[in-house]
Image: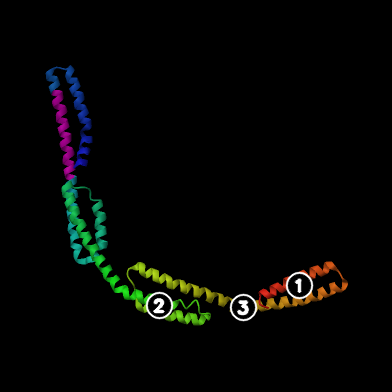
Amino acid sequence: MEADDRRGERAVRPVVRATRRAARVCRRASASSCGKRFRDARATLDKHRREFYAGMDEQHRAAHDAKARLVERAEALASKGEEGIGAYRTLLDEWKSAGRAWKKADDALWARFKAAGDALYAARGEREQADAEASREKIEAKRALLIEAAAVPKEKDTAKARALLTGIQRRWDEIGRIFPREAERGLDDDLRKIEQGLKAREDADWKSNNPETKARQNDMTQQLRDAIAGLEADLEKAKASKDKNAIAKATEALEARKSWLKALGG
């Protein structure tokens, strides 16, 4: 009500100023004229005040009725338990836009509305606690699988590593979901890192053993070998002619081709 009183004061402030002006005029006017002016100003002030508070009462009444209906709808969600939370949130949005009722009545309605919501969230809390309790054994089972999965990166044969990981993943899925979700995400992330590491190894193996890649590599290897043979002949000729310039160029080119061939595994 304090906020309403402040709004009321602001609303009648112009009338109060008019009343004060009338009082100043009264000091210079006759008694009868002064009395009439003052009574008129006072009547105007009272009229504005009554109109303002009547309007406020109407707003408070409308807000009270709207919120009372919202409380009834919120309390009716109790039988739905956790499933009623979504509907309760919708009611909460309506509550925020319903306006203010009289303070004591508004506080009492809010206490009932909040209690209805607390009951729904309490049902969720109980369910989450039960899920977490039921997940303890599952968490331990998945941790044991992660210990097994640590052997995957150590297995040099990617086919064997894949077979090992696939078996672990199958058992992982059979264990099922885990609560709370944070615990499940942490365990899934650890297994995913192992999967990603193996996938990177498989990709690298495929690139190195890809028939097309090998064909291109073999073709390049042969070209380098042919080039090396030609350069070795050029070097011998340069040595025979004792041409230092030709010897240096042939030697440099020959060493470069031999290093490329070595990089290709030739």
Q: Is residue 122 part of the magenta span, yes or no?
A: no
Q: Is residue 53 part of the magenta span, yes or no?
A: yes
- Rendered view: 81 above or below 28: below
Please state if 252 lies on the left or on the right of 31 as rendered: right
- Span shown in magenta: 36-58
Q: Which residue is mark 1?
A: 254
Crowd band around label 3 with a 10 angstrom C-alpha radius: few (<14), some (14–19), many (20+): few
Please state if 55 lies on the left or on the right of 236 as rendered: left
Which amino acid type is shown beneath numbered disc 2? Answer: Leu
Q: Earlier in the sequence, mark 1 or mark 2?
A: 2
Q: Which residue is mark 2?
A: 145
Crowd band around label 2 with a 10 angstrom C-alpha radius: few (<14), some (14–19), many (20+): some
Q: Which x, y percent locates residue 89?
A: 26, 59
Tell me the number on the disc at residue 212: 3
* Magenta highlight: main SS: helix
Which amino acid type is shown beneath numbered disc 3? Answer: Glu
Identify the residue shown where x is 17% and y is 18%: 27
